[in-house]
Image: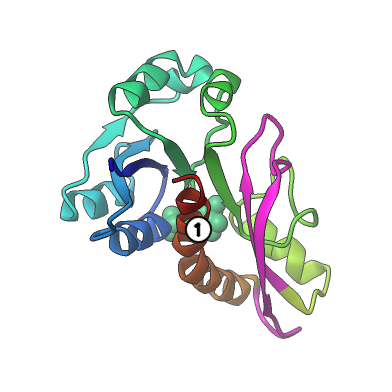
């Protein structure tokens, strides 16, 4: 049986991407075949190199229509795309080409704290301001609207009123690392 092939899209440090590289390193059914980034100095590149996973840098212009990127993904026979801290909007052509095969993680419990402008520390600051007693992660399919694709899994974590946005971010990131690869593995395995 041929393995299911996942490509990771990331723009930053890539700590989630690293968890995927580790999790699927010796998997029998699923492999991480490539990394796509818009940022030639993204930390994820060095992490991919460590695992001998090829990376592809496409600057912002290429993400406007996604045409060249779609062809590249097809050449690589990619089955699924995992967004792990990818900062540009995914073009609708790409979403259509990989319908129900693109996953994202949002660092809060959607539908709260989602939508345009809600990324990175903005999310954790909003959670803090709302005096929430918990935050967490939402893993969802990507559709053409920010953070509105069908939810696959949510995991919460308690937060204290005294937690700073940075402390909330750390707690949530830990939950991301523990759950993101595992949840994607379950979804992809179901399709085999
Ligand atoms: C994570 O918090 C993720 O939820 C968000 O961006 C961050 C990426 O961090 N979309 P990293 O690059 O995986 O370390």
Single out the residue that lies furthest toward the right: 130
Q: How crowded is mark 1: few (under 14 residues within 10 Å), some or many (20 or more)?
A: few
Q: Is there any visible trace of residue 84 in the rendered image?
A: no
Task: Say if 52 sits above or below 20 in the image.
Answer: above
Q: Nearer the viewer, residue 70 or 168?
A: 70
Q: Which residue is found at the position 30% from the left and 44% from the top?
A: 3
Residue 70 falls in which quadrant of the image?
top left
Give the percent coordinates (x, y) of residue 103: 54, 44
Q: Is residue 81 left or right of residue 91?
A: left
Task: Say if 111 sits above or below 38 in the image.
Answer: below
Residue carrying label 1: 186
Task: Say if 139 sits above or below 90 in the image.
Answer: below
Q: Which residue is found at the position 59% from the left and 35% from the top?
A: 100
Q: Which residue is found at the position 53% from the left and 38% from the top?
A: 102
Q: Is there any visible trace of residue 154 in the rendered image?
A: yes
Q: Nearer the viewer, residue 67 or 153?
A: 153
Q: How is the image coloured?
A: rainbow
Q: SS of the residue at dot 1?
A: helix
Q: What is the tally of numbered marks visible in this picture?
A: 1
Q: Which residue is found at the position 30% from the left and 57% from the top?
A: 21
Q: What stretch is highlighted in magenta?
A: 135-164
Give the percent coordinates (x, y) of residue 138: 65, 58
Give the percent coordinates (x, y) of residue 115: 74, 43
Q: Indicate the quadrant containing the N terminus: top left, top right, bottom left or bottom right.
A: top left
Q: In this view, does 81 lie to the left or right of 135?
A: left
Q: Is residue 75 magenta?
A: no
Q: Which of 31 and 144 is in front in this view?
A: 31
Give the percent coordinates (x, y) of residue 96: 58, 22
Task: Say if 130 sits above or below 63 in the image.
Answer: below
């Amino acid at each position: 049986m041929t393995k299911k092939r996942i490509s990771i899209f990331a723009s930053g440090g890539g700590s989630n991407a690293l968890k995927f590289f580790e999790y699927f390193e010796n998997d029998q059914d699923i492999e991480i075949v490539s990394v796509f980034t818009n940022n030639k100095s993204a930390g994820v590149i060095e992490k991919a190199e460590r695992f001998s996973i090829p990376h592809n840098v496409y600057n912002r212009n290429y993400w406007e229509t996604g045409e060249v990127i779609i062809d590249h993904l097809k050449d690589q026979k990619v089955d699924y795309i995992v967004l792990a801290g990818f900062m540009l909007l995914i073009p609708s052509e790409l979403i259509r080409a990989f319908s129900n095969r693109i996953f994202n993680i949002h660092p809060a419990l959607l539908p709260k704290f989602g939508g345009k402008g809600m990324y990175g520390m903005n999310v954790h600051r909003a959670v803090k301001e709302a005096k929430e007693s918990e935050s967490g992660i939402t893993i969802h399919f990507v559709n053409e609207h920010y953070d509105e694709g069908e939810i696959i899994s949510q995991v919460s974590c308690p937060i204290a009123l005294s937690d700073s946005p940075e402390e909330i971010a750390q707690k949530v990131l830990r939950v991301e690392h523990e759950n993101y690869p595992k949840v994607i593995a379950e979804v992809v395995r179901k399709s085999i």
